[in-house]
């Protein structure tokens, strides 16, 4: 399998060597690549049908693109009882994750594997010093950022930070959180792009103000740079991937170990009803960037691949890799109460102390991107490219930017 370097992938790689291969005799080759390269590899594999990769690590934004290239795990579980893991329990996966990550038009494309999701992280020491309260609204989040910048910029600390590299998918992720938080959506129910409507423009105006309170390097950072900016103490708060907390808690590499509090995202000003959105989009401020693990229908070794896929995503393994991998990816109800997970809920590298907030965010604040085959192209090569041009000053207004995106997207979708 080809995978992004994620906490669960690190944990799985360790267990493969120490446990899975010695017990089964099945060798597993895990190729770790940047996310965009994983997409390129899988796209080529599907186009050729050669089955170079037996398991597909699929970002939620690709689910529609690969929906015809995997085997529904529920079907193979029922049809091959002799290979079924005891107690695998599909119902143990949190339902919002199954709906938001794994499903496309009634088919389970893969099983939930990884769940980076936006939560609030904030400097408890700075909040106490400035008498700030954790933001429960979009306006309060912006005001907190402005106050922190005003009071702490002279010390090199800004109100917030971001993952705003031009042309990178991370820029699209930040955009959707602010868009959904202001009552907007990427698509209308008729399938046309709606980022240029009143709510979309309101979100852009908000984002411009927010960016004024970020370090200058934010234009060059993807998620890795954003995480480093938090760990180095450059920002007082952030709405971003919960999986950053374990590294920020590591006293060996972080200047803010034990200083970050966690909370659910600020509530949206309003949320666009689902029947007014297109392609199964679910607006909310807790943007999820989850992934699924799927069994390739082109694989020539489907049985051993299926055995490993179940092993990697069964309740016990999922709980253990949440700790081994660095404190991330609680996909199942059972994970939150696992003894290893509860024992790791303390300040330090690999902490799980943010898990209760992640669970609440998944259940009540989770936003999911649209499901359509073209979304991988739109979210990687159109929206972040044009947003990057806007923030670089090439486009004068949010309206111009959003209209340019709308024209390109609607032309691609022929709507």
Image: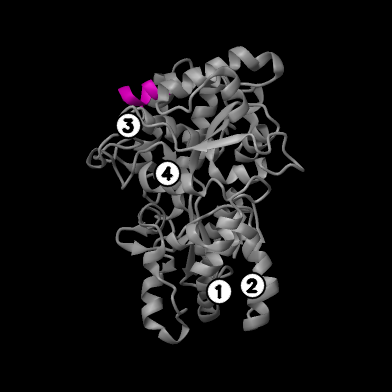
Q: Which mark is residue 361?
A: 4
Q: Residue at x 31, y 41 (%)?
A: 414
Q: Nearer the viewer, residue 149 or 376?
A: 149
Left or right of 117, for residue 109: left
Local crowd at mark 2 within 10 Å, few (<14), some, or many (≥20)? some
Q: Position of residue 292 (x, y in %)?
A: 48, 59
Q: Is residue 285 magenta?
A: no
Q: CA distance from mark 4 to mark 2?
A: 33 Å
Residue 28, disc: 2
Q: Are marks 3 and 1 in contact (CB under 8 Å)?
A: no
Stretch of the chain drawn in magenta: 196-203
Tell me the residue that label 3 is attached to: 194
Upstream in sequence: badge 4 or badge 2: 2
At 56% from the left and 28% from the top, the residue drawn is 237
Q: Nearer the viewer, residue 61 or 96?
A: 96
SS for callout 2: loop
Quickly name the residue at label 1: 308
- Residues under labels 1 and 2: Cα distance? 8 Å
CB-based contact (under 8 Å), mark 1 and mark 2: yes
In three-dimensional space, the C-alpha distance between marks 3 and 1, rounded to whole angstroms, equals 42 Å
Query: Which is more N-terminal, label 4 or label 1?
Result: 1
Q: Work out which quarter of the rendered image holds the N terminus and state it.
A: bottom right
Quarter holding the C terminus is top left
Q: Tell me: residue 402, above or below residue 250.
A: above
Of residues 393 and 74, the one nearer the viewer is: 74
Q: Position of residue 44 (x, y in %)?
A: 55, 59
Measuring from the top left, give residue 338's x and y in whole percent: 52, 62
Is residue 286 visible to the viewer in this orientation of the structure?
yes
Crowding near the residue tagged with mark 3, few <14, some 14–19, many ≥20 C-alpha atoms within 10 Å: many
């Amino acid at each position: 399998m080809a995978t992004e370097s994620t906490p669960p992938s690190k944990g799985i790689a360790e267990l493969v060597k120490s446990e899975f291969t010695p017990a089964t005799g099945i060798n597993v080759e895990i190729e770790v690549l940047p996310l965009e390269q994983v997409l390129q590899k899988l796209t080529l594999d599907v186009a050729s049908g050669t089955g170079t990769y037996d398991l597909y690590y699929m970002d939620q934004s690709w689910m529609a693109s690969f929906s015809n290239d995997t085997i529904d795990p529920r079907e193979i579980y029922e049809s091959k009882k002799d290979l079924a893991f005891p107690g695998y329990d599909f119902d143990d996966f949190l339902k919002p994750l199954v709906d938001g990550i794994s499903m496309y038009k009634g088919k389970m494309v893969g099983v939930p594997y990884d769940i980076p999701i936006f939560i609030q992280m904030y400097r408890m020491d700075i909040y106490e010093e400035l008498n700030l309260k954790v933001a429960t609204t979009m306006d309060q989040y912006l005001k907190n950022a402005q106050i922190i910048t005003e009071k702490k910029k002279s010390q090199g600390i800004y109100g917030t930070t971001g993952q705003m590299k031009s042309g990178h998918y991370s820029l699209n992720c930040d955009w959707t959180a602010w868009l959904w938080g202001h009552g907007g959506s990427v698509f209308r129910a008729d399938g046309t792009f709606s980022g240029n409507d009143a709510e979309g423009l309101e979100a852009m105006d908000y984002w411009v103000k927010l960016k004024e309170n970020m370090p200058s390097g934010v234009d060059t950072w993807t998620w890795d740079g954003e995480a480093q900016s938090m760990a180095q103490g450059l920002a007082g708060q952030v709405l971003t991937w919960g999986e950053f907390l374990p590294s920020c808690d590591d006293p060996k590499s972080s200047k803010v170990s034990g200083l970050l509090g966690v909370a659910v995202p600020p509530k949206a000003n309003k949320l666009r009803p689902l029947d007014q959105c297109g392609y199964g989009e679910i607006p909310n401020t807790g943007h999820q960037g989850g992934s699924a693990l799927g069994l390739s229908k082109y694989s020539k070794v489907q049985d051993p691949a299926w055995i490993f896929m179940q092993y990697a995503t069964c309740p016990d393994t999922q709980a253990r890799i949440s700790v081994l991998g660095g404190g991330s990816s609680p996909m199942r109800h059972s994970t939150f109460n696992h003894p290893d997970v509860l024992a790791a809920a303390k300040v330090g590298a690999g902490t799980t102390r943010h898990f209760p907030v992640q669970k609440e965010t998944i259940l009540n604040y989770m936003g999911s991107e649209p499901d359509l085959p073209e979304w991988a192209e739109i979210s990687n090569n159109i929206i972040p490219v044009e947003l990057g041009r806007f923030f670089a000053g090439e486009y004068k207004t949010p309206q111009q930017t959003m209209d340019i995106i709308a024209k390109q997207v609607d032309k691609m979708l022929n709507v």
